[in-house]
Image: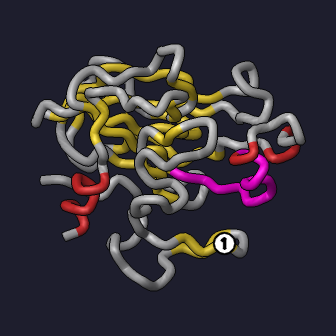
Amino acid sequence: MKRWPLNLKTPGKTAPDKVTAGKIYLVKIPQKREAGSFWEDRGDRFHCGIDLYAPENTEVHSIEEGIVTETGLMTSPEILPYWNPTYYVIIKNNSGIFCKYGELAECTLQKGEQIGSGQLVGYVGMVLNCAKIDESSPPYIRKLKNKNPSMLHFELWENKPITSHKNYLGGNWFSEEKPENLIDPTEYLASIMD
C-alpha cells in the first residue's frame, strides 16, 4: 500500500494543515506551470521533480516498500553559496521505479536497507540561505529571497536516477531536453491522494 510521503494531515484538503511561524502549508501537488511543479521552466533551468511544501523538520516517509540504493549530499554552500546543506535518499520501490526524496535536513536510512511503506526516510530541509542571495544569484533564486520555502523535493525515475551529470544540479536540469528516464511524478502522487 502506498503512503503519502509527508507527515501532515490527510492530503488534498483545501484548508491549511499546518501553521508554522506565520506560514500556512497546504497539502497539495503543484500543477503544470505552478511554482514547484514538474519540469517548471525556471529561466535557466528546468525542475526535475515536484516540491511538496511543508514546515522544516516535518517527517518524510517512504511511499512504497523497497531498498535504499543511494544517499548523498544534494545541496551545499560549497556548491552554491546561497544553498544550505541538504541530503537525498533514493529508494528502488518493489514496483521497480526509483523515488528520490530530496532537500532533506537529514536522512535516517543507509544504502542497502530494506524499507517498508511509511518508514521514516528523513526530515524536510531548508535549501536556501537567504542571507547569501544577492544580485549575482539567478533571477529565479532572487525571487525566493526571504520567502524561506521548506519542502520535500520528490523525483521519480524509470531506472537509475541521475545524481551526477553536467546538466543536473540540485534537482534541476540545465537543458531543454529532459532526461529520458525521468518521470513526471504528478499522477503517481495524485494516486496516493485518491
**Vertical position of residue 49 compared to residue 12: above or below:** above
Judged from the image, the secondary structure of the residue bearing numbered disc 1 is: strand
**Vertical position of residue 41 compared to residue 14: above or below:** above
**Residue type pointed to by label 1:** Lys
Q: Residue furthest front?
A: 176
Question: Image quadrant of residue 73?
Answer: top right
Quarter occupied by the C terminus: bottom left
Disc 1: CA contacts within 10 A as few (<14), some (14-19) or many (>=20): some
| Foreground residue among 125 and 147 | 147
Say which residue appears at 13% left-offset and 30% top-offset. Answer: 96
Say whether residue 143 is magenta.
Answer: yes
Say which residue appears at 53% left-offset and 14% top-offset. Answer: 166
Can you give x and y, in whole percent of width and height, for residue 23 in the image? 66, 72
Q: Residue furthest bottom?
A: 15
Can you give x and y, in whole percent of width and height, for residue 90 in the image? 35, 29
What is the tally of numbered marks visible in this picture? Answer: 1
Question: Image quadrant of residue 105?
Answer: top right
Can you give x and y, in whole percent of width and height, for residue 178 in the image? 38, 32
The residue singled out by tag 1 in the image is: 23
Say whether residue 84 is magenta.
Answer: no
**In the figure, is residue 158 to the left or right of 23?**
left
Can you give x and y, in whole percent of width and height, for residue 55 in the image? 58, 60
Say which residue appears at 29% left-offset and 25% top-offset. Answer: 68
**Vertical position of residue 173 compared to residue 10: above or below:** above
Say which residue appears at 49% left-offset and 21% top-offset. Answer: 72
Specify the segment rendered in magenta. Answer: 141-151
How is the rendered protein coloured? secondary structure
